[in-house]
Amino acid sequence: MCGIVGAVTSRQAQAILLAGLHRLEYRGYDSAGMAIVGENGIERRRTVGNVQELDDALMAAPLAGVTGIAHTRWATHGVPAVSNAHPHVAGDGRIALVHNGIIENYERLREELKQGGCRFESDTDSEVIAHLLDECLRRNPEMELRDAVREAARRLEGAFALAVISANDPSRIVAMRVGSPLVVGLGIGENFVASDVPALRPVTDRFLILEEGDLVELTAAGITVWDFQDETAVRTTLRITTDTGDADRGNYRHYMHKEIHEQPQTVRDALEGRVGRARVLEPAFGVNASAVLDGTRAVTIAACGTSYYTGCVARYWIEELAGIPCNVEIASEFRYRKFVVPDGSLFVTISQSGETADTLAALRIAQETGFEHSLTLCNVPVSSLVRESELAFMLHAGTEVAVASTKATTAQFVALMLLTILLARRAGLTAEREAELVAALRQLPEVVAQALALEPRIRALAEQFMDCHHALFLGRGLQYPVALEGALKLKEISYIHAEGYPAGELKHGPLALVDDDMPVVAVAPGNELVEKVRANLEEVRSRSGRLYVFADADSGIVEGEGVTVVEVPRVHELLAPIVYTIPLQLLAYHTAVLKGTDADRPRNLAKSVTVE
Ligand code: AGP
């Protein structure tokens, strides 16, 4: 997705900005650009394709100057094209701006600006901001650039991080964040701004993480931050010495453990720039997302393993909230069966790697057999699924090293809920209901952190699983796929045979397995199905089964002889699968550690399954 780098220094800025852009390539993008303010005012170069193209263009025609901004763009409004690439300029080239995020009300602003005589060069929402700034400065030529940014920002709805330079003052960059990340890098006699820490690691290890609504002015000599109320603010400086934060296990014994604990942040990252105050921002799904979703009458999801299970949760969401049929397919089955394509079908693939052979084959078959549109929810921008799908939504979970998927899984859930809301909006989801779901999504990182705090309890429980040969996982409704995923995690890394079942199926077979040797794990939030689940759990208890129940305080399920209850934090009912997945990840992890299996690299499995 889009990336920002800015530098105000006393050496040539071009090399710093280019190095930063190269380090942002992992986020995925389709064009790149740079603007530097030098002796002749602002000059810029923009190219479509790899940052290397920009590198070559700059090699042929370098930009001289010590203050500049640069950007990698992932198209949301307007196709990938030089004219749509950032930086955007306004005021006869006296202002240049880079922007991450989505401006929801850009069409209205664009019309107003056009009526005022403004001419647009691009199809982007971002260019609107450049012209708003220019309008402020024309009205009041004495106005400071930072005041113009503040004033323009008041008119913007949506999520944004931006950095601006002006030919009138080559000694500063003004930047601001609302709903999209932005960090300041502190140098000696130079300062930097970027959307992401890794972009600036070659030039500094001292960072200042801006808060929501912060506006910052950077000069080579110093930085000043103003908060949302326009009061000067002090932000803590952090020393970050790791390089990417991803490829490093830090103090964790296993990547899987680290990745489980990263989930409050990765859930936040999956949401960042994709939700406004009370709405999901539609272009987050790509340039043509609106048109594609307008025509969507049915959804088919294809995926493998854990990604398939997240898709299974989405079926409940989509059919309940959007009221359209949602079919979820195991990709390796789908590719070899005859199927009927419902009219107006959107084909959705889910994959952390983007290279899973069966999922890729399913996509290709779908494209040949009449599915009108395709969307992938994927964690790797430079992957086959992203390349070959019409629309792509990047999960932003960061590199997932452990074979067992954890943080990519919860990011997939977030992506699927955002997709559900967009489809549901077309089916009459009210603004109030959407605002309620967005508020619950915004609280999710905090609830995920609370779920992680259950770790000591779960570590102790793992001792009761380590010597088991089998385990059953039960859930109903939205929690049924969570039970499937819990069982997969346990078998995958601890080699304990585990099966997930809908709790109502117990008496149709698996109950025969239950005895005092068989741990039965149940996921049972206090929702409308909880009474049914309790009845199922009684069936286990009366056969001396050992029950381990993950439930919230509303479930009414209490500990007793043979029943262990782990109290999971309350969360919006529809988001419960995301939160209940976390303790099951921890259970699998600690069981594997106690058994001494390799939690990161389980036998016989690969991170990216590129063969059939
Ligand atoms: C998850 O823990 C597993 N390693 C596996 O089931 C995985 O989800 C599956 O192979 C699909 O991978 P993908 O998400 O990269 O397509």
Image (tube, rainbow, N blue to C red):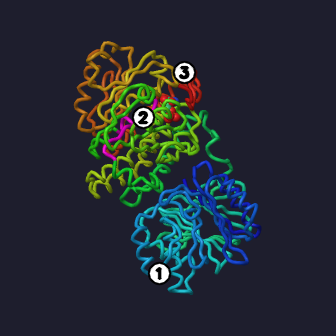
Ligand 1 within 8 Å, label 3 CB: no
Looking at the rendered structure, the kind of residue marked 3 is Lys
- Give me the disc on residue 302: 2
The residue located at (67%, 53%) in the rendering is 22
Residue 511 visible at all: yes
Task: Point out residue 106 in the picture as x, y percentages from the top left corner.
Answer: 43, 67
Looking at the rendered structure, the kind of residue marked 2 is Ala
Which residue in the protein does label 1 denote?
A: 117
- The answer to which image quadrant residue 115 occupies is bottom left
Q: Earlier in the sequence, mark 3 or mark 2?
A: 2
The range drawn in magenta is 296-314
Q: Badge 2, how many Cα within 10 Å: few under 14, some, many 20+?
A: many
The residue located at (26%, 35%) in the rendering is 556
Q: Badge 3, how many Cα within 10 Å: few under 14, some, many 20+?
A: some
Q: Which dot, 3 or 2, sits closer to the camera?
A: 2
Which residue in the protein does label 3 denote?
A: 595
The residue located at (32%, 56%) in the rendering is 435
Looking at the rendered structure, the kind of residue marked 1 is Gly
Q: Which dot, 1 or 3, sits closer to the camera?
A: 1
Q: CA distance from mark 3 to mark 2?
A: 34 Å
